Image (tube, grey):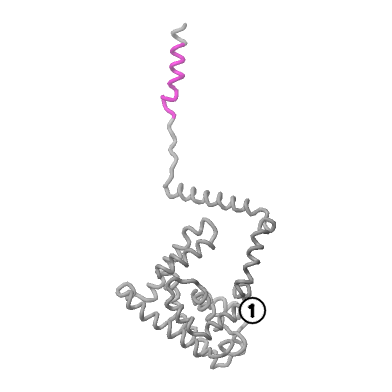
Amino acid sequence: MGFGLSHGIKLVFSLQKYNADYDLSATQSADTLAFVSLLEEKLLPVLIHTFWVDAKNYVEHTRKWYAETIPFPLNFFLPNAMHKRHLQRLQLIWGDDYMEDEEKLEKELYREARECLTLLSQRLGSQKFFFGDSPASLDALVFSRLAPLLKAKLPNGKLQQHLKSLQNLCNYCTSILSLYFPWDGGDPLSAAPRAAGTESTEAEEDPHKRRKQLLSVLVGLAAMLGYAFLSGIVSIQRGSVGPAGRQPIAMEEEEEEEEE
């Protein structure tokens, strides 16, 4: 979700002569920079807080989704590690004020995020994309921020409710989903029969599925055992072979001497 990653991807495409902003005017390019800065400064921190810091959203949605999606055994500890990293990131962005009066700061930041969404809605207007009928880099960035917020089933959706009240932004996200991601943005009802058919032919499509599952379980167990040995949780103590081990032999020798 960071600006550095998106900027790096954009730079790589630019070096390969792929530039979505090639046809933009100087004014439109300046608007792009201004809105990118606005999104990263006002909207992104609140999105991180919504998905990763808000206790109800994190436990009931974010952690659950990642735990079901990430393969075993990484799903046991990666979501918590990501949660801690995002929390540290917010503390760096918001500074010491975040710990002093968290509730007051959240209200102010959520207010600024709502204003940011309203500005985006006003700039988009009735257009298909922000700069006409063709998408630009700003459209990619805005969509990547708004689509998860719009589609996620959040138990605590303060910012989500404001987004849903801006109809043109909702239509904007839905249009991009149906145009570029038809398998995600299509009609859920039409996808249901396909899911049912997939279950019936699952064994035919992947005959080695159970073997792969067994291997993944064995790898997970090996990883956990290795971690237990390396961390000292489990250790093996070897008994020393001393005189007690040789005692039966000595007794047999004494018995032979008595018989003689």
Asked if residue 7 lies in the magenta stretch, the reply is: no
Q: Residue at x 40, y 80 (%)?
A: 110
Q: Is residue 86 left or right of residue 207?
A: left
State the extent of the magenta-drawn residues as a range: 241-255
Work out which residue is located at the far right of the displayed protein and give it. 204
The residue pinned by badge 1 equals 16
Using the rendered view, name the quadrant where residue 44 is placed.
bottom left
**201 shown above or below 37:** above
Whole-percent x and y of residue 95?
35, 75
Q: Residue at x 47, y 50 (%)?
A: 227
Residue lying furthest left in this view? 100
Position of residue 244 measured from the top left corner of the image (x, y, whole percent): 41, 24
Position above or below: 150 against 223: below
Residue situated in front as seen by the camera: 221 or 192: 192
Q: In the image, what residue type sits under mark 1? A: Gln
Q: Is residue 143 left or right of residue 59?
A: right
Which residue is situated farthest in the top direction here?
260
Which SS does the magenta portion mostly show?
A: helix
Determine which quarter of the picture holds residue 139. bottom right
Q: How many numbered marks have been drawn onto this rendered protein structure?
A: 1
Residue 191 or residue 125, whichever sits in front: 191
141, 12: nearer the viewer: 141
Question: For the residue labelled by badge 1, is the local secondary structure a helix, a strand or a loop?
Answer: loop
Is residue 253 one of those drawn in magenta? yes
Residue 212 drawn at (x, y percent): 62, 53
The residue that appears at 43% across and 38% down in the rendered structure is 237
Where residue 178 sits, quadrant-wise, is: bottom right
Q: Position of residue 185 (x, y in %)?
A: 60, 75
Crowding at mark 1 (Cα within 10 Å: few <14, some 14-19, many 20+): few
Taking the spot 52% from the left edge, 84% from the top edge, the residue there is: 169
